[in-house]
Image (spheres, grey):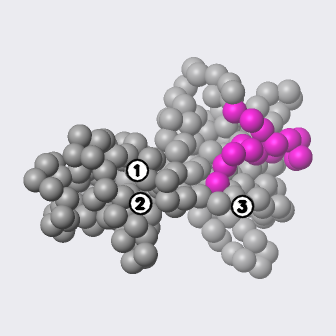
Amino acid sequence: MTMTHPITQTSALTPEQFRTAISHFASGVTIVTTHHEGVDYGATASAVCSLSTAPPSLVVCLNLASGTGKAIERTGRLAVNVLGEEDGQLASRFATKGKDRFAGVPLDRSDPAAPVLANSLASLSCRVDERIVSGTHAVHLCTVDTVTVRRGAPLVYYRGRFGSYLAQPDAALERRVREELASASPDELMTVEDLSRRLEAQPAAVAAVIRRIELDGPPAHSGTDGHRGTSRNGYHRLPA
């Protein structure tokens, strides 16, 4: 069922002003997928939120110009794939027109009408119960049929950039990170990925420890040269 709500302009707020303000709202990142007449469709979307737990329901908003949205209108099925912190390039690919978005991306086709990204942090297969057109977007009210959840940390979108969620680290992890950095040679470049693998910890948690060390300053026993560390995206660096 599709409903259309006409919009009456009652504010002097410009689209640019609104975009600037709403960009300060940090959100998770998803790729919405569907399949129609032999073609896979997918689009990056951050305008996704839970609606109800009984029944399990989601709200998914897509631009009216979206090819994925038009396919969903025909199929009545979609999957929401929650991206992990390492999926920034994938999110950019699915947000760019003219690219082969699914190239090299493994899919689970248990639901032929709504394939899911096999390596997503979580996936939710849904049926569309209602489609409401408002302004430039279609709002899909969906009932969730099945879910899959995997371990990991989420990708975050904030002010036009993709980044990592900085989990609050526990004291034990912070102590281990400090010990690793203190024992490293002065000229060694220590990355978040290196520490995460070595400590078997989530990169976001390790990055949060490094951020805390940045604010506190290098450990007193780290030597005059200090030790440096950097995350995958360059957001976190220990004082040199």
Can you give x and y, in whole percent of width and height, for residue 174 in the image?
37, 70
Can you give x and y, in whole percent of width and height, for residue 140 in the image?
68, 56
Find the distance from the CA under tag 2 to the CA under tag 3: 22 Å
Q: Label 1: which residue?
A: 192
Give me the residue at 69% from left, 33% from top: 105
Among all residues in the image, which is located at the extreme left? 224
Provide the secondary structure element on which disc 3 rests. strand
Give me the residue at 44% from left, 63% from top: 205
Labels 2 and 1: the sequence-earlier one: 1
Q: Quadrant of the N terminus?
A: bottom right
Image height check: is 38 above or below 160?
above
Q: In this view, does 109 lie to the left or right of 131?
A: right
Give me the residue at 74% from left, 44% from top: 118
Give, as a single range, the part of the protein colored magenta.
105-121
Q: Which amino acid does label 2 sit on?
A: Val
Image height check: is 90 above or below 216?
above
Look at discs 3 and 1 and give the one toward the viewer.
Answer: 1
Look at discs 2 and 3 and give the one toward the viewer.
Answer: 2
Q: In this view, does 225 lie to the left or right of 106?
A: left
Labels 2 and 3: the sequence-earlier one: 3
Quarter of the figure with residue 180 = bottom left
Can you give x and y, in whole percent of width and height, for residue 219 in the image?
20, 65
Labels 3 and 1: the sequence-earlier one: 3
Q: Label 2: which residue?
A: 206
Find the distance from the CA under tag 3 to the CA under tag 1: 24 Å
Quarter of the figure with residue 221 = bottom left
Give me the residue at 59% from left, 58% from top: 152
Image height check: is 130 above or below 37?
below
Quarter of the figure with residue 232 = top left
**Neighbour tally class for label 3: few under 14, some 14-19, many 20 plus, Cα within 10 Å:** few
Q: Label 3: which residue?
A: 149
